[in-house]
Structure formats: structure tokens, C-alpha cells
Image (spheres, rainbow, N blue to C red):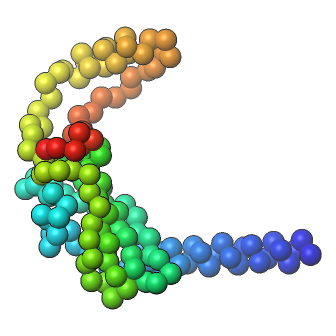
């Protein structure tokens, strides 16, 4: 009984992996035709993060967003298509396209020192600093 259950579990997991791999390798919709829907700015670039396909064939492709080379935290989008691949909508948190400077206002060493001081009780070790865009305020 245990061997049968184990074999069935392996088959189920392998089948799920094949289904996810197949749906991930399918052509995802390009973002460009829906630029205004996803509040895309001239400096935006999008990369596919994941794709989920419903039982009815509709798919939902999640993209990460970068702005002028910087990762935008809170800027991810999801493009929804029906079973035939036609665009049916998107999910996006931004109210307007981003329009901001990509130059750091605080030197990296100062930022690392401030972060370490503010979190001294947890004894964090700042190994690397990086600049990123914050899209969580929902405006550009």
C-alpha cells in the first residue's frame, strides 16, 4: 500500500511539474501593447517572473518591473489572458507611471551606517548596499 501511494505521489508531482514547465515555456503576452494599462514609463523594463494557467485555460503572467535599470519594489504587474491568449486585463499597483531620479541622494557608506545604527539591537551586518525604486506608494 505504501509503495502504491508513494508511486502515485511521485507521478502526481511529476505531472504537476510538467504542467508548470509547459505553461511557463508558453509564449507570455508582451507588455508593450498594454503600456497604459500597467502604467509603464519610458524607462520601464519588464521580466516574466511566473505564469499560472487556470483549468479553463486562462493565464496570469506576473512580471517584475525595473525603472532605468533599478528594481522597482511594489511595481510588479500581472497580465491576464483568456484561453485563446487574448488580453483581458491587468493587475497593477501604481496609479501613474514612474518619473523619478535614479541618482542616490545618500552615499552608500552613510546608508549602511544608518541602517546598522537603526537596527543595532538585532545586530545586522550590512554586506552590500544597492539603490532601488519604491513603487509601494502607488504613485510615480
Please provide percent x and percent y for residue 55.
50, 81
In the drawing, does residue 69 fall left or right of residue 84?
left
In the drawing, does residue 1 fall left or right of residue 92?
right
Residue most toward the right?
A: 1
In the drawing, does residue 90 fall left or right of residue 7?
left
Query: Is residue 25 among what the camera can see?
Result: no
Please provide percent x and percent y for residue 58.
40, 79
Please provide percent x and percent y for residue 136.
27, 41
The N terminus sits in image quarter: bottom right
The vertical placement of 32 against 94, above or below, is below
Please provide percent x and percent y for residue 109.
25, 18
Q: Quadrant of residue 53?
A: bottom left
Which residue lies at the image location 34% right of the left edge and 82% below the top edge?
Answer: 82
The C terminus sits in image quarter: top left
The vertical placement of 17 against 55, above or below, is above
Which residue lies at the image location 87% right of the left edge and 74% below the top edge?
Answer: 3
Which residue lies at the image location 86% right of the left edge and 78% below the top edge?
Answer: 4
The vertical placement of 108 against 46, above or below, is above
Q: Quadrant of residue 129?
A: top left
Q: Quadrant of residue 52?
A: bottom left
Amino acid at each position: 500500500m505504501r509503495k502504491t501511494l508513494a508511486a502515485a505521489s511521485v507521478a502526481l508531482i511529476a505531472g504537476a511539474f510538467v504542467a508548470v514547465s509547459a505553461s511557463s515555456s508558453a509564449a507570455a503576452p508582451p507588455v508593450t501593447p498594454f503600456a497604459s494599462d500597467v502604467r509603464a514609463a519610458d524607462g520601464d523594463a519588464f521580466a516574466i517572473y511566473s505564469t499560472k494557467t487556470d483549468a479553463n485555460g486562462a493565464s496570469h503572467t506576473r512580471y517584475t518591473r525595473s525603472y532605468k535599470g533599478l528594481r522597482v519594489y511594489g511595481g510588479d504587474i500581472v497580465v491576464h489572458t483568456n484561453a485563446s491568449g487574448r488580453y483581458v486585463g491587468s493587475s497593477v499597483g501604481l496609479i501613474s507611471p514612474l518619473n523619478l531620479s535614479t541618482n542616490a541622494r545618500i552615499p552608500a557608506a552613510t546608508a549602511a551606517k544608518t541602517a546598522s545604527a537603526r537596527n543595532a539591537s538585532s545586530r545586522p551586518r550590512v554586506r552590500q548596499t544597492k539603490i532601488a525604486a519604491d513603487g509601494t506608494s502607488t504613485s510615480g
